[in-house]
Amino acid sequence: MHHVVIGAGPAGVVAAEHLRKYDPDSSVTIVGGEEEPPYSRMAIPYYLVKRIPEGGTHLRKSSGYYDRMGIDVKHGRVTGVDTNANAVSLDGGGSVNYDKLLIATGASPVAPPIPGTDLDGVRNCWDLPDAREIIKYCEPGKRIVLIGAGFIGCIILEALVASGAQVHVVEMENRMVPRMMNETAGGLIGQWCGDKGIEVHTGTRVESIDEKNGALSVSLGDGGRLDADLAITATGVAPNIGFARDSGIDVDEGLLVNEYLQTRSENVYAAGDCAQGRDFSTGEYSVQAIQPTAVEHGRIAARNMARGHEHYHWGNVNMNVLDTMGLISSSFGLWMGADGGDSAELLDKNEYRYLNLQFKDDVLVGASSLGLTEHVGVVRGLIQSKTRLKNWKDKLRKDPTRLMEAYLANTQAVGHNAHVL
Amino acid sequence: MLKALQLEPEKCTGCLQCEMACSYENEGVFNPAKSRIKVFNFHDEGRFAPYTCTQCDEAWCLYACPVEAIAINAGTGAKEVLGDTCVGCKVCTIACPFGTVNYNSSTGKVIKCDLCGGDPWCAKACPTGAITYVDADGTGMERMRAWARQGMPPAGASVNAPAEKEIPNYESA
């Protein structure tokens, strides 16, 4: 049995390790599209802020690891999948045959529709080559314009500001991280950034980027104009699935998979940022493009590839945790609310603390927070276990911070549950 | 045989000796906020519940880590944070469905229970036997672990008719 994994990010590497574990006699090959050892994009912000060397981004760090695991790591860009011949074709003419294939090719940045994004000095912040380029501009006096205040934009702000560069952020929505935070929380993140010396421009878009006298000139929709040495575009990503079109695999927003993460082609599975898998909260199929979902997809797909369909995929809770220059925010599931649901909210603007819980009936279905670092994972636990909160919903409405108590009281041998009262 | 922390809330008096011992031995300060074990207070019932990582087999935290900074200690079975490798991205803190991995802003890294290398101080500090370190089989941890393994609701959970229950009415906020 030859398992082939295309993509050397977290989904691909975790899947390969689990294929090795579940199917010890098989051969396992990873085909990675980049000329790097398998690495984690999630670690790039920490490389930019110089907390880790470049090698600190590598997914597995001990030398000879993949050889010892019996995982063959090849470099090559996949250009097509022939699901009849069970083979993937590579850039340059080679091909790799598979018995089972996992597509974990991730995503790539989408260039915003702005004239001038092809100029030198305009970069994405997505892969290691981008990071190596951006780090050259991280020095005092440099002028950096960040286009897009989403997750990636916010998480690299600390590195940019810490370098002494002068930073402007432009976000077309009315607040920071609009896909993760409501107006209250997103507005507070913007205020936090402003207090730290960042010029935040929300509710306006970049109209064009021009080059003048060796520097960039960024024109805004509100008439403003920003001079810059570097413009970073961080306006969203899209799945790397072009090669899979016309291959017998259903392609929508991402690669469509069933509840076993299998595509329409029997021997082909998909995982991570390229897969359009089930969302736990909505029951619908969507591309989440987050680290925890990528690795869980990888584990589940590997098990189903190696052992037959024994792991049903109930869907992933969409969730994120973000550190914007020291202000920690998180969002889970239906953080924006559920139809027919209700909510509880706690806000301390001066301390930048916020907690918003969303309920459907007496079940927690979503949450968002600022400044919450203790026991935050229990939000996921409560959502994913669909724990009925019973009288604890009322208590959470009075004090939303008592999430752990609500969880323990309803799931563990505490008080009445212990049958000792 | 692997050992595990056995937590028996009905024996807990809420004295917080475990939190003090944990924070002192692991962080060098008597600061319950830095303890990896936490006693939750059910003041209206007069009850307390000590709770920490169950070292679950699923190891959500370990797999969610993007930089291989959580590893299994082969001797104890504990999932340990490698402080030198952790970048403080906090993905493990949202991935752990039990809420037992916390971010420590003073170090910029995450902390979780590591069983103190096989001799947990919380158990030694507990005066009432609410926290003991015993052979893993008899701990009742199995039930908690089963929940961790399951991770997702059992088949059909979302289509069962809800059981009859009292639904309180709330005024809108």
Image (cartoon, helix red, strand yellow):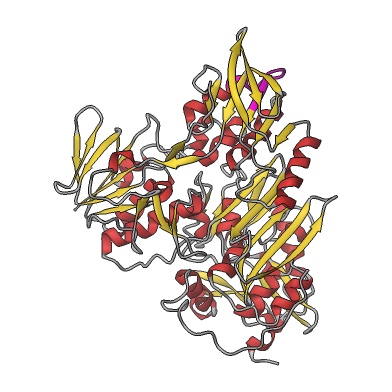
Give coordinates of residue B97: x percent, y percent: 56, 64
Does A89 sit above or below residue B104?
above
Give coordinates of residue A190: x percent, y percent: 74, 41
Residue at image point 57% right, 32% down:
A47
Does A141 sit above or below residue A271?
above
Does A360 sit above or below residue A55?
below
Farthest left residue?
Answer: A85
Q: Can see residue A280?
A: yes
Quadrant assignment, res A363: bottom right
Q: Can see residue B99?
A: no
Residue at image point 56% right, 42% down:
B85
User: Along the horizontal axis of the image, is A33 left or right of A273?
Assistant: left
The magenta-colored residue range is: A136-145
Farthest top residue?
Answer: A213
Give coordinates of residue A195: x percent, y percent: 81, 36
Does A5 sit above or below residue B31?
above
